[in-house]
Image (spheres, helix red, strand yellow):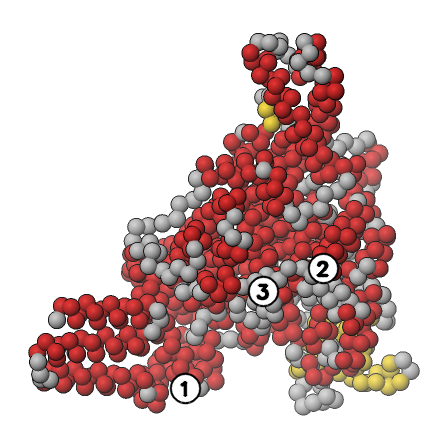
Amino acid sequence: MTLTLIIAALVGGCLLFRGHAWLSLVSTPALVIAGWTATQGDFAAPQIVSTGALVLVGLITSVPKLRRWILTGPAMTLVAPLLPRMSQTERVALEAGSVWWDGELFSGNPDWAKLAAFEIQPLSPEEESFLEQEVETLCHMTDSSQVDDLGDLPPETWAYLKANGFMGLIIPKEHGGLGFSAQAISEIITRCSSHNVTLAITVMLPASLGPAELLLHYGTQEQKEHWLPRLARGDEIPAFALTEPLAGSDAASLTSRGVICHEEWKGKRALGVRLTWNKRYITLAPVATLLGIAFQLEDPDGLIGDEVHRGITLALVPTDLPGVKIGDRHDPLGVKFINGPTTGEEVFVPLNMIIGETEQVGNGWRMLMDCLSAGRSISLPGLATGATQTTLRTVTSYGLLREQFGMPIVRFEGVEEKISKLAGHAWWMDAARQLTAGAVASGEKPAVLSAIMKAYTTEYMRITVNQGMDVLAGAAICRGPRNVLAGFYQSIPIGITVEGANILTRTMIIFGQGALRCHPHAFDEVDAVEKNDAALFDRAFSGHVGHVVSTGFRAALLGWSAGLLASNPLPGRTGRAARQATRLSAAFALVSEAAMITLGANLKRKERLTARLADALAHLYFASAAIHRDATRGQRSEEAPFFEWAMRTHLGAVEDAILGVLENLESRWLARSLRLLMFPLGRQTSPPSDALEQQLALLAISDESVRNDLTHSVHLPKPERGGLGALEQGREVVLKVRPLRKRLNTAVHSGELPRGSEAQVTEAALEKDLITQEEAQLIEEARLLQVDLIQVDTFGPEAYRARCGA
């Protein structure tokens, strides 16, 4: 009998671990009864009663009508008041886009073989050529100092953008555009961002949420044929206007109004919309020729249907129409991209200016959310990655040139610590950027992952740029052509604020949307209650109960085994990391269930809890990106320290977030129980060690191939421009003379040469024929170049007043 119990427990446990809760429920007692009967030798009364009970339980839990009558029907009545209610705006946002790897992470049992098999498609030859030719030319011709002086891109840069297809990156070739993939657009934005933020924003806007993308997805054929070629050529400058003084992320609060009416249009009476709006923070609006306007549409006279309030609608508005006002600009922290307000008073446009015409009336919010679910994956993550890579390259050049106490500052452990973190963040941010862009290029529109990428990469841009500022110190503070980092530093709050402020995204959107959209059953449960659909609720609730039981068992088993019992389809270090990520995915899934079950609809208002759950999901995704990169790049030996650093950093952050939820969960007994189940020994992931971070720093500073790989998206300006190009040239010269300097230092320490300044030591070495005249000249050139490159910009009184606009 003991053996029977062991076998039954093993079979039931295996089924439960693999997510087969119902089979576990039925098979475990069935095996016990069978073993009991075999031991007793006859089928006595106890076995008959037990078998009957098992059959009854099996029937109730497997026959839908019985299950609804006895179990899920009453459960629906009890659960309904606890579930969150969805407004139409929330429902549209939840249903936008697609679920991709985020669904695997929510399942608590991610399929790592599936992720490793996902191929990021390489750029096409045309895209690769465009990146290395047109994009490089664009960056070379754009002088950041000139942009600051003009308050805009130079006219020749604007002309080049229009003439070379930058305004039509996403527009298909049949409509006159380039039709590039999401992967290519991400690379282009990252490269431009590494050079100049204003340039990057100007390039990304036509390729982001706006008239072109909305027309591509929702426009009529006639609208596409008319507008897309003009947008692709740059004949029309687009801007999209959503945000208002009283409405940002809360689209239901839009005050912009449109009324269906008849008015004169080009000499004829036409049916159309009379619009009034007041928008702000609209990029390119001051120079736009074609506005996309989001507004609430009303049809009081029933001219297009029976409904009066038709909902959020999107329309195209040429800016030369009477009543349209553009031209004023905001000053976004001195960053010179074009951004400003626009207003419209009683502006009439015909019905064919509504995007999608009458078919898309009232669908504006859905259109926006669907497009944004992909767009947020590309633009701002590219900006953040470009800034991080450039900061790393700048710091590793400047740190070699700047000396204190007779040695380069990169050799000080305090500076080394900053560089190691910069290098680690640069590695995983690029992995996450490429993975997400690759998913979008494959046809996914990962709404939750795009929100994660936007919010967290811009937050890490804040961290990495500040790390660079710490190292460069005064050289990063004094603005001018020599300062590489000031532009990034100024732009940090911009990336954090636009396309959904990070506070809102972290506290409400990521987990709020993910918990319903990515969870295997939660959305169907809420949907079933709102529709009063008992059959749908039965399927969803039954599945949810099984999911909770299986997840709880898996999380406990993985917690107590330190992840060793997790399935491991990947080899080597990648597989070991995947095991730990599976352990924490199960823990995340279980603690999410605990929060949703105990707090119900109130979870929406517990924003600090949902923020921590968002942190856990985000860092699980970044760990996944690192696993994908390591698996698909063949576990390169030189990347081992970066992979380990990324896993320790992100899995540690997941643990911190989950433990933070447990520490603040209102049900204290449940929190303590879950902690014992999932973290019996406490925090299991240790942070990166000093020795590991020293490896990262040394590789980023001294290994040229690793340094180039970490900063592969960075545009290198010509040395005569100053800034990064000059620092790179100086670094090359210093590395070239390093063996000579080492030889002289050895001679000084041995007493062969007297102590003194480098110039004095060089002269003494020359006199003793320890070096040649050419070598002495090379050392002197390097010394003078170092002195020059660590200088900062200064301005005379008149020049400074001009910089201040006085």
- Work out how far the residue at label 3 is from the one at label 1, CA to CA, in angstroms: 36 Å
Residue 642 seen: no
Front: mark 2 or 1? 2
Q: Is residue 158 left or right of residue 267?
A: left
Question: Mark 2 highlights which residue?
Answer: 125
- Nearest-to-viewer mark from 3 and 2: 2
Question: How far across and how far down the image is residue 650, in percent?
Answer: 47, 51
- Which residue is located at x 44 percent, y 86 percent? 533
Nearer the observer, 84 or 135: 135
- Report which residue position mark 3 lands on: 439
Which amino acid, by three-letter code, is at mark 1? Ala
- 82, 789: nearer the viewer: 789
User: Residue at 57% across / 59% down in the picture?
Assistant: 435
* Vertical comparison of 176 with 396: above or below: below
Above or below residue 107? Residue 349 is below
Q: Residue at x 17, y 70 (%)?
A: 5
Which amino acid, mark 3? Ala
Task: Using residue 667 as the reference point, say whether residue 507 is left or right of it.
Answer: right
State the image coordinates of residue 199 (x, y, percent, origin top left): 75, 52
